[in-house]
């Protein structure tokens, strides 16, 4: 069957179809991606009021694309105390946040309890706050560092109050590219295995893809196919998040930022390929706010949130260090013709703004 006929009939697309989609023009891709987005969500765009916290930038691993780790070009190593983290959460709760998103580097000096006990403390003091924390990369690090199985780390995360897992650390699954950009950290199969175990424990997670660096279009489609296969088995992924590579202050030599057209094509193709992951998140931090607004017309139905502070991508050049004020967030969505709908962390609707 011809590709356009498959798109017309909303048929599941193969790897070859995915690669061929890139040869279609942007507006044809947008038409089909937007149709699916509209069928599922109408004019709604989801966001949440959240706070990102990055407790330490001291890292045992060496990822070429990372500008956040203190062993790279960042001269300012830090590790927050639990009291500092609790004070941050307390202040953010006053701003009405519903979620904390806690992701760290792989710090071998703190001990396992520093990573886990903070979740218990946050839950005790702020039981209504959803804790989205620890990427599969961190779980792999904690498992190898402290000689515990993935299952044991996951069980301890759940006991400590972690509600869901963020999608970081996926980067690009293709093993050759992965070796070049982040060799030595969690492998693709391990990343997928950890999410599978998390889903089997009855929990939900997200999945990211870092693109716009040295990967090929084929690598992106392969990444999506591996996620789609796992999602068929577990149905535990809430959202897919294509992260646009930021170029500054790291050691990966990529001069060209991907064109707006390539970024939007990748969003639209994500929507078309990932027929079993409901939400497509245009993370405004890496795509830029303007392109995230456009991405709403190319399949995206979610924009992450207000985030208040962001250290990982802003270290690499993204304009996200201080998040975005709530009213501005709501206004840009409205001005772009969509209806801002505040959601909780697992996509229950809270309020139409
Ligand atoms: O895993 C690191 C990426 C991720 C760069 O699950 C970079 O809801 C671009 O995973 N350019 C962390 N990206 C952020 C993340 C995330 C963000 C928002 C929402 C969710 C979610 C997850 O940032 C890392 C890595 O892939 N990253 N360096 C860079 N130079």
Image (cartoon, rainbow, N blue to C red):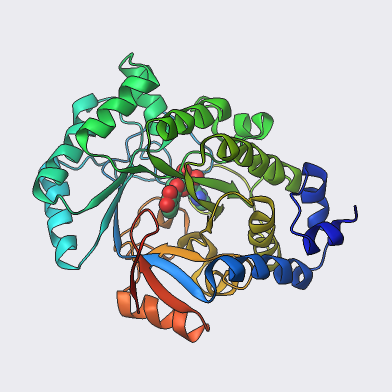
- Taking the view exactly as shown, the residue that stands out farthest to the top is 147
Percent x, y of residue 103: 34, 43
Q: Nearer the viewer, residue 172 or 5?
A: 5
Q: Is residue 60 visible?
A: no
> Relative to 117, is 278 on the left or the right?
right
> Relative to 22, is 125 on the left or the right?
left
Question: With respect to residue 43, does 170 lie above or below?
Answer: above
Percent x, y of residue 82: 14, 41
Q: Nearer the viewer, residue 50 or 74?
A: 50
Residue at 61 percent of width and 33 percent of height: 178
Percent x, y of residue 181: 58, 36
Dividing the image into 4 quarters, which one contains the C terminus?
bottom left
Question: With respect to residue 233, does 97 lie above or below?
Answer: below
> Relative to 56, is 346 on the left or the right?
right
Residue at 62 percent of width and 45 percent of height: 253
Question: With respect to residue 33, does 233 lie above or below?
Answer: above
Q: Is residue 83 visible?
A: yes
Residue at 70 percent of width and 67 percent of height: 261
The image quadrant of residue 146 is top left
Residue at 39 percent of width and 72 percent of height: 341
How many marks do you count on the picture? Answer: 0
Percent x, y of residue 99: 27, 55
Q: Nearer the viewer, residue 71 or 28?
A: 28
């Amino acid at each position: 069957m011809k590709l356009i006929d498959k798109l017309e009939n909303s048929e599941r697309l193969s790897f070859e179809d995915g690669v061929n989609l890139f040869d279609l023009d942007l507006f044809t891709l947008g038409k089909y991606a937007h149709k699916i987005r509209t069928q599922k969500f109408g004019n709604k765009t989801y966001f949440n009021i959240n706070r990102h916290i990055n407790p330490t930038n001291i890292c045992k691993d060496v990822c070429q694309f990372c500008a956040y780790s203190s062993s790279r070009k960042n001269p300012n190593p830090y590790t927050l105390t639990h009291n500092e983290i609790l004070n941050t959460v307390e202040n953010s709760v006053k701003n009405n946040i519903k979620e904390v998103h806690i992701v760290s580097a792989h710090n071998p000096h703190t001990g396992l309890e520093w990573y886990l006990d903070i979740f218990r403390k946050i839950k005790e003091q702020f039981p209504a706050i959803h804790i989205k924390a620890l990427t599969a990369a961190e779980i792999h690090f904690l498992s190898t560092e402290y000689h515990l199985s993935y299952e044991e780390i996951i069980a301890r995360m759940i006991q400590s109050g972690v509600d869901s897992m963020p999608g970081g650390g996926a980067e690009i699954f293709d093993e050759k590219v992965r070796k070049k950009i982040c060799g030595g950290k969690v492998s693709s199969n391990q990343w997928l295995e950890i999410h599978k175990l998390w889903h089997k424990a009855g929990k939900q997670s997200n999945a990211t893809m870092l693109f716009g660096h040295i990967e090929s279009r084929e690598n992106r489609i392969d990444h999506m196919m591996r996620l789609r296969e796992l999602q068929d088995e577990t149905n535990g992924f809430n959202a897919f998040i294509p992260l646009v590579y930021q170029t500054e202050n790291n050691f990966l030599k990529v001069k060209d930022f991907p064109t707006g057209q390539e970024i939007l094509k990748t969003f639209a193709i994500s929507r078309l390929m990932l027929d079993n992951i409901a939400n497509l998140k245009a993370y405004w931090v890496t795509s830029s706010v303007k392109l995230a607004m456009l991405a709403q017309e190319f399949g995206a139905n979610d924009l992450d949130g207000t985030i208040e502070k962001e250290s990982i991508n802003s270290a690499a050049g993204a304009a996200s260090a201080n998040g975005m004020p709530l009213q501005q967030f709501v206004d840009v969505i409205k001005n772009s013709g969509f209806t801002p709908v505040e959601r909780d962390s697992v996509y229950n609707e809270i309020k139409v703004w």
